[in-house]
Image (cartoon, rainbow, N blue to C red):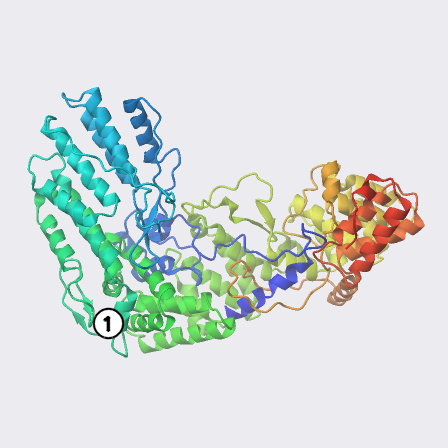
Amino acid sequence: MSAVKGWSMALMAIMTINPCNAWASGSEESSDMFVDRRATDIELSRYDKGSLGVILPSYPRAYLYPAWRAIVLGSDGLKAHPPAQNGLREAIGIHEGNWVDEKHPLKQWQDESTKVLQQQIRLDATVFRSVSKGYSYYLNCPRPAFLFAIKNLATLKTRPDATSGRLQQWVSAQNSVFDFCDYDVRAMSYGARPNRLAPEMPKPLAATEPRYWRQMRDYQIATALFYNESYTESRRAFNVIAITHDHPMQRWGAYLALRSSIRIITMEAEGDWDIQLKSLPEGTAGNKRMGTAVFGERRVVGTPPDILAPVIAQARRILADPSLQHVHDATRASVRTAQYRLTPLDRLYELSERLDDTAQDPHRESTLGDWRRLMNDLFNGVDAQRGEKVGSDLRQRFAYFDWIRSLQDCGLATENVRAACAAASARVLKRLEEAPGPAQRPGERRAWMLAALMLSDKASPQLERFALDVPPTAPEYLTARYHLARLYRIAGQPAQAREVSQAALESPQFALAQSNSAAILFQQERLASARSLSDAASYLTRKSEWVTDLDTGETLPAKDTPYSTRLAADGLVWLNTRLSVSDLFTLARSRGLPESTKGAVVTSAWMRADFLGQTDIANQSAELAKQWPGLRDTAIAYLAAPNAGDKRHILILNSLRHGLSPSLNTYVPDYTQSLTPLSPEMQINTVASMWCAVSIPKPAPPDPWNPWIEQVPPPPDLSADAGARDREISELAKIGTATGFVGAHVLNRAKTHPSDPDLPWLLYVVVQSTRGGCVDAGNSKLSRTAYTILHTRFKNSPWTLRTSSWY
């Protein structure tokens, strides 16, 4: 893999041959708009059940653990131990947003309030409060708060003693409760209104009011205290409700008192990573653990032992009461939140041990979701050495964590990519040597063999045999086949690489995966091992990630939108740097190339041939270009031009008008449609930005922090005459940027055709193009010369009036 990555990191520089849309000839960096390397594009419930597509080592932990579990259990094991349907979606944190839109329950509550009070009501809701002295936040009034209020109002309306006045009083008091949602007692909340007066607390009802209505008001007061961060007072009020047997909210009292208790300790205590990590003995983490009970009370030596004791005691009382069954799950979740906040290291080890048992549902009680968040906190939020200390211990204890980290050591390497991947590969191979026999749990060896295959640059007989023997029904099938094709290609066996890639693309498993990323990865390998120009033509264009549902990860059917299918980086490198003019002309007549791309390819051949003085191919290309409506008029004019200078001028003029370029870009114009003339506004904004350089620049240094670089293999060398191609590329490199090339042509045109009616506009374009972007060494002189000619010879032209300075 490292060899592939080493090449791919150079693509940013190579792609500077592409045209662009910026001042002058601005460059466009290569971006991986086709393969999502940060997450799977497979619908998450299918991915969680073993439809893995092609696993990438750059995936986060929450995506790699389900892959480990699927491989270890195998297809039959996954059927016997299925995960929760939406577990992975929730673990990763894809959920309905808290922003207030028309579907937010706050809007529904405002509508209900308006009906009861007969006046328009507006409230704010989304305010996040900070927790303790850290950077954690919680939403003060979540969506369920408004849904519960709507439900309570509906119940109140059905009571025989529900008068219009009582309902209005209750709704007004509830709005006072919600008025605390965006009130910040500490002026630290995100989204709170600044310099705001404190809301008025709801007042108890008069003793003359029915007891039921007075009790509902007491509940509102307790809730307002909670939202106001008066947690000691709210706990006391909720406890009173919990022991009042005829209270309509009694069934919620104990749970809400527990929430108040949790807020007290999470807002005031310093229970964070630092306390637990500082208490660790030198050596490995968590090697001396104490007791297990409900909620997994495991403590690292030195951790304050009773920080959660009161909360756990409250929770146990709730769980022991059958009449409170409706809040048992919420109680467990609340205690887990407290553990997460106050004893994160204990909680991390508890969850890590659960995940070690692949037969368990990884989403039971939010196991994977909480583990993911704690891992993010550990490696992103504390001292790096302490995080690595825990990580090292976890790697020794849990094979799945070592597997994940080994992959990520290569996929997320931040220094020398080749060295990082080599070290990760060596670690995986050592792991295989240490536990090759029956002592290893069933399925784990398959996972480690796959990791070795993914990280290796050479297919040993053992790895090749493993990849060939992976059954099509196995979750790792497509990943194994992809890396087998990659290793065949690296080993100089293109026929085998081609066979494996093509078979995978045509397999039922590929169709079932519904993964656009997997399709692109195999197409990249298929292009890299192409055997001829026509064979390569079928793999140059790719569907972009625009056809992926960003909420679910599901790949949607391709939409009929502009640029839904585009040239990718490997195709662009191949077209722009690996083919001669003759090759491009041959390719333009290939059946495998899409019509929209053919127009751009024949334009490239046409312009390159003209610039190089290859008259025959230039004329043949122009003749071929007549079949595309968007090129027809230019081709006819070119063929009718009396001399080489006029032919060149027609190309330059239409290059500015319609984006013709000797180099291809990701976004190629659709020449299958007639091109419209430039509007006045487009004429004003036109600059010579069609290319930066038609050459092969020096490779850029690796940039592992940039996830947008396309990780593509090197394109194939299929040129009919590599020597002629290299000589052509060398000559084309001398023409410089579009700004300089067009500018020189226009200045020469001003000498040879001083009456050309397009000259004022062309001189204006030259000056505007020199403002910035890709320019040549003599840019300032070019700009000043064009400016001088324009202001000397065309004083009354509107283009002269628009050109107030040179650059």
Q: Which residue is mark 1?
A: 286
Who's the residue at 36% across and 73% down the image? 385
> Where is residue 779 drawn, in percent x and y?
78, 59
Who's the residue at 27% across and 23% down the image? 116
Between 799 and 205, which is closer to the camera in this rendering?
A: 205
- Residue 465 is at least partly visible in this image: no
The amino acid marked with disc number 1 is Gly
Query: Looking at the picture, does residue 621 appear above or below residue 484?
Result: above
Query: Looking at the picture, does residue 551 appear above or below residue 417?
Result: above
Q: What is the secondary structure assignment of the residue under circle 1?
A: loop
Give the total number of marks visible in the rendering: 1
> Where is residue 354 drawn, in percent x and y?
23, 61
Left or right: 698 as drawn, with respect to 184 = right
Looking at the rendering, which quadrant does residue 638 occupy?
top right
Left or right: 373 as drawn, with respect to 210 = right
Between 744 and 447, which is closer to the camera in this rendering?
A: 744
Quarter placement of the C terminus: bottom right
Query: Looking at the picture, does residue 374 appear above or below residue 435?
Result: above
Who's the residue at 34% across and 40% down the image? 125
